[in-house]
Image: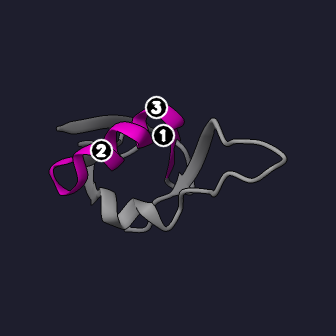
Amino acid sequence: MIEVKSTVASPLRFIITRHEWDQASKIGSAYIFHVWDMAKAPPVLYERTSAQIASHIPADNEDGKWESVEILLGS
């Protein structure tokens, strides 16, 4: 499974929704994030595994549950 994202943001970043992360968590290592940097000519593709993204996912707590998270993408 591939989740495709594109961005022109600087610094390079993208948003993952709760639903997208739930799917990635269920599928595990077979789930890959493709993030396209559309500010480059030609666009540049960055690939990240679910394991590489996992440390950026917030934890729910008694005050609430996260719905989306912005993740900075290093080169």
Residue type, label 3 = His
The residue to which callout 1 is attached is 8
The residue to which callout 2 is attached is 26
The residue to which callout 3 is attached is 19
How much space separates mark 2 and mark 1, taking CA atoms?
29 Å
Q: Measuring 19% from the left and 57% from the top, which residue is drawn there? A: 29
Residue contact between numbered discs 2 and 3, judged by CB atoms under 8 Å: no
Q: Earlier in the sequence, mark 2 or mark 1?
A: 1
> Which residues make up the magenta segment?
13-31
Q: Earlier in the sequence, mark 3 or mark 1?
A: 1
Within the magenta stretch, is there residue 12?
Answer: no
Q: Is residue 7 left or right of residue 25?
A: right
Q: Is residue 32 above or below residue 16?
A: below
Q: Is residue 35 left or right of residue 11?
A: left
Where does residue 35 sit, x and y in percent of width and height? 33, 45
Where does residue 58 sit, x and y in percent of width and height? 62, 57
How much space separates mark 2 and mark 3, taking CA atoms?
11 Å
Find the residue positioned furthest to the front: 62
> Which quarter of the figure is the N terminus placed in?
top left
Label 2: how many Cα within 10 Å (few below 14, some 14–19, many 20+): few
Find the residue positioned furthest to the top: 19
Please tell me whether mark 3 or mark 1 is closer to you in this view: 3
Q: Earlier in the sequence, mark 2 or mark 3?
A: 3
Label 1: how many Cα within 10 Å (few below 14, some 14–19, many 20+): some
